[in-house]
Image (cartoon, helix red, strand yellow):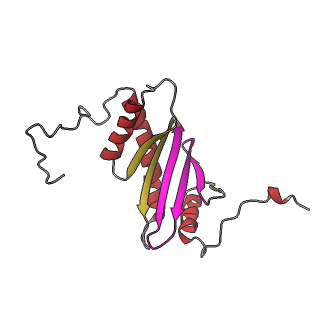
Amino acid sequence: MTDPTNLPSFPPPADEHPLRGVVLDALQDEGFRPDIDDDGDMSFKVEGQQMFVHTTEGELPVMRVFGQWQIAENLPDDLLTQYRAANDLSLRLNIVKAGINAGTLVVTCEHIIMPNADVRQLLQLSYQLVLTAVQMWHQLMLGEDVFGDTGQAPVFGQGQAPTDGPV
């Protein structure tokens, strides 16, 4: 008899977690071999990097594509500098959110998935955005100007008001 711990991890029935099933199919169609953990999160490798997808079912289903990276010792260890670089990415890039937690950079892309959404295309866009954001964060930490400007936001409140309307 086969050891039950050696059995493969099978996906849940499609009607139990419909979005997770669609995402799993899309990942497999792209040639990935995703694993599903005990929480239902899917993991896969792209360009040598470990990525994850978390889905939330409900009235507004959400797909969250994310990755996490240990911050290298050769980068500045000043938390304020790390937070500022993550904040800059979150404010400048659509969909992307970046944060720092216990020496780890976490970058995510989240989408509300409507019934006719092209999940495969959203997955491709998301993991590419996550990887691009990680590269940009690293460049910011090395002092590079990745946005082609001074990287400084205008300072308001000294006789100057924003022109885009109320803040």
Identified at 52% across, 62% down, the residue is 55
* Residue 97, placed above or below residue 111: above
* Quadrant assignment for the N terminus: bottom right
Identified at 42% across, 31% down, the residue is 79
* Residue 10, placed above or below residue 94: below
Q: Is residue 103 left or right of residue 87?
A: right
* Residue 46 percent location from the top left of the image: 55, 46
Q: Nearer the viewer, residue 106 or 156?
A: 156
* Residue 136, placed above or below residue 107: above
Q: For residue 65: magenta? A: yes
Identified at 81% across, 56% down, the residue is 5
* Residue 11 percent location from the top left of the image: 66, 65
Identified at 49% across, 23% down, the residue is 74
Q: State whether residue 132 appears in this view.
A: no
**Circle count:** 0
* Residue 28 percent location from the top left of the image: 59, 59
Q: Which residues are magenta?
A: 40-69
Q: For residue 4: magenta? A: no
* Residue 7 percent location from the top left of the image: 79, 59
